[in-house]
Image: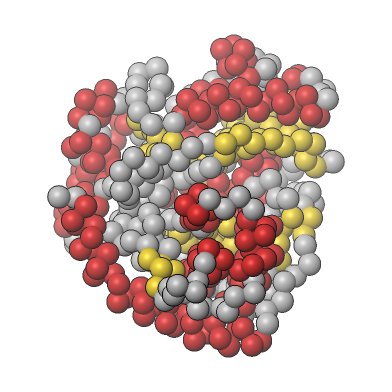
Amino acid sequence: MAELLLGIDLGTTSTKAVLVDPVLGVLAEQSRPVALHSDRVGHAEADPAVWWRNVGELVPALLADARVPADAVAAVATSGMVPAVLALDRRGRPLRRAILQNDARAGAEIADLAAKLGDLDVAARTGSALTQQSVAPTLAWLSRHEPDTYAATVTVAGSYDWLARALGARQHVERNWAMESGLYELDGRPFTPMFEAGGVDERLVPEVVDPGQRIGEVSAEAAGHTGLVAGTPILVGGADHVLSAFAAGLRQPGDWLIKLGGGGDILAVTESAFVDRRLYLDAHPAPGLWLPNGCMSTSGSLVRWLAALTGEQDLVSLGERAATRRPGEVLCLPYFLGEKSPLHDPDLRGAFVGLDLAHDRADLFRAVLEAVAFGFRHHVDIFTERGVPLSGAPRVTNGGAGSPIWKQIHADVLGRPVVPVLRHPGAALGAALAAGVGIGLLADWHARTDYLQLGEPVLPDPDRVARYDDVYRTWRRLGEALAPFSHTLANRSRT
């Protein structure tokens, strides 16, 4: 009897897949790299052909690792960054590279739409403000700068929705892609003023579906590419940060998580739809729960940029050296792709301030790690200010959860313990669980799935907590002071 679950996640820097037994947990996991294309300032793109090639390699590798036949897979679901934008032709083929969620090209279009929608409270209607993450400005940019591509576009999809369709699913977009796109109201109806202001035809966006819903079966063509059995059910997965948080155990109001991936995410579970224009709002997979959250444009991607720039190969050794440096001696503004929440300013630019000839790459490395932690503290300040409950210690996931210095910096900057999730498969696991709920191998979204191993809590150091309180305030003032210079430089780059 087929009883295994396959989850696939299209991440910013890698494609990941897991094979899960609902009783035993994760049987196998694999990943393949993905290049981030940033051909111009503010652009962030990925090639769907690489995603598809990776999936064709990952599935056979998983089956081989687990030593199981393809007909043991009961269902598959997908996850990915949100809201990435793929322009598709009549056959569902991408017309260009995917425009990712941290892309900051559409500044002028955002301003145009904001002027047209000035009398409306977009955040109250849709759950999120009009920002660089909104889909309408991206489509307006495409219409203006790539008119031939836009004219040939028949359907718009998110990254993981496209992958499900490539596997054989019908046209669709998942609920949280729809919410974060800014094209839909909180109750799921199209937000007509946004479509009209952006000149977007509502027919470009297909049916909105919920996680766990069955949307098709693996096609013969996809079976030939992946090694899956034709007819294997395809279920709706969801947004990477949502499914990663769900898989990491965020099930009750007050649970919260920090995700140190390519970008930086912070999520908290609430019982009601919490709206703040500085943040985003997603629906928890479990009906009746919500996930207000923040997403910073860079996190691990900034670490990788610095490593590539300095030629550093050994980040473990670099972290050990950085741990010996004084906290907050060099400050970094991490706006190397503009910034999403809570500032929502695509024209911000990155900076290092306080450099001396005595400093080296370890000082820069520590400054980058601190900058991301300061960004999360800014979000925590907003949650606290608005009365969102944050119970106990946050869980920390993704690549950064394996860095001793980064975990310690977060504990010190936030002034509370943090609990690392060890070897968390991330959103791929969440997608597999969504498939399990959809076909009934898991009873519901609250089914017990203790597949994860938690590390020892990392405790804050009182002396560093006090120092970081002061450094954080300086960091906030520095960001405000340099913002006008960022805007000048951004405008200059467009001329």
Describe the colour scheme in one phrase: secondary structure
**Looking at the image, which residue is at 73% across and 50% down?**
423
> Quadrant of the rendered structure where residue 436 is?
top right
Q: Against 382, is 398 above or below?
A: above
Residue 252 shows in the view: no
Residue 326 image offset from top left, x and y in percent: 58, 79
Q: Is residue 25 rendered to the left or right of residue 317? A: right
Residue 133 shows in the view: yes
Q: Against 441, is 119 above or below?
A: below
> Quadrant of the rendered structure where residue 347 is?
bottom left
Q: Nearer the viewer, residue 91 or 395?
A: 395
Q: Is residue 197 rendered to the left or right of residue 18? A: left
Q: Nearer the viewer, residue 235 or 110?
A: 110
The quarter of the rendered structure image containing the N terminus is top right
Residue 268 image offset from top left, x and y in percent: 57, 64
Residue 467 image offset from top left, x and y in percent: 56, 86
Residue 220 image offset from top left, x and y in percent: 59, 11
Q: Is residue 88 rendered to the left or right of residue 249? A: left
**Looking at the image, which residue is at 65% across and 28% down?**
58
Q: Nearer the viewer, residue 78 or 405?
A: 405
**Looking at the image, which residue is at 19% across and 50% down?**
494
Q: Is residue 144 rendered to the left or right of residue 248? A: left
**Looking at the image, which residue is at 25% across and 36% down?**
142
All told, the count of numbered labels is: 0
